[in-house]
Image: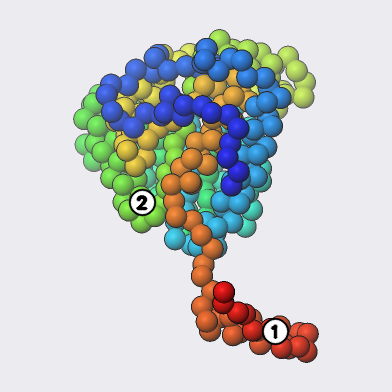
Amino acid sequence: MQEANMKLDLTHFTYDGTGPFRIQDWDTDIPKTEQGLSEAEIQTEIAQNVDDLAQAQSKLYAQKRYSLLLIFQGLDAAGKDGMIRHVMSGVNPQGTTVVSFKQPTPEELAHDYLWRTRVAFPQAGNITIFNRSHYEEVLVDRVHPENLLLEHLPHIDTVADVTPKLWKRRYKDIRHMESMASRDGIVIEKFFLHMSKGEQKKRFLDRIEQPDKNWKFSEADIRERRYWDDYQQAYQEAIAGTATKKAPWHIIPADNKWFGRLIVSKLILARLATLPLAYPTVTAEQKAGLHAALEELTGQKPRPTTKN
């Protein structure tokens, strides 16, 4: 992979559980130190990163020792779809899966709350992208605890039965699940697309006023916007309760879509660079098979390789 041109301090966008986490302390727009970057420069860098990611994926897929799980969370209109479309545009679809988690189905509600996401974790060599994830169970359900009444939970008969202990247990469950996955070679990268309330309003208005974006608008988005402060609190506690060294959270400034895409692409590449990715070594038996196939196809014996 070529060395990236822009030198950015990626630790500025990462929280690994060290120290307190306050969501209002994290940028929603380009940090002042990086505001000199032009959109053209950013797009050029992203294009290079997309190419580098494709090369890394090729080794990941061939080696089949590690896999990559990318989790994208954010409020409505934060840009999750566009982020996935632009950053992952160069990967091989054969080894990539995108999973969008919507409102749980009756079958999903009949299982434990982590079941539907757990079974979608990537197999060895693959990249799986979660557009929303198991974190909905500590975000949406935290803001709307009445949802828990549909989950067949023991001792939860009314909203009054939902206590802070339930959320702390769920944070612990999630940490344990992600820790187990990490031990099995699943590399987990979690991205919170952190958008300001003003930017969300602007994007909603665009969806209403521009005919070609009307299809994106949902009245449910406006209803959920009324719970803005509740969601901010839910995200703050969920991130603080589930960020670890192995599976940290990346807080991505989402008011500027291109800058956010740049940071995400660089973070993914930086994590892949820590893995010993390589194409499998060809054995002597496999080499003999290659030589035999070449001779059959060409009618010529391959020249013996010499060692210097």
Q: Residue at x 53, y 84 (%)?
A: 285
Label located before the other in sequence (2 or 1)? 2
Q: Quadrant of the C terminus?
A: bottom right
Tag 2 residue: 181
What crowding class fits label 2: few (fewer than 14 Cα within 10 Å), some (14-19), or many (20 or more)?
some
Tag 1 residue: 302
Quadrant hosting residue 263: top right
Residue sticking out furthest to the front: 308
Tell me the tag on residue 179: none
**Element assignment for label 1:** loop
Color theme of the render: rainbow
Q: Is residue 59 above or below residue 106?
A: below
Residue 83 rendering spot, x and y as whole percentages: 60, 33
What crowding class fits label 1: few (fewer than 14 Cα within 10 Å), some (14-19), or many (20 or more)?
few
Q: Residue at x 63, y 41 (%)?
A: 50
Q: CA distance from mark 2 to mark 1?
A: 45 Å
Residue 161 rendering spot, x and y as whole percentages: 23, 28
Residue 73 rendering spot, x and y as whole percentages: 48, 31
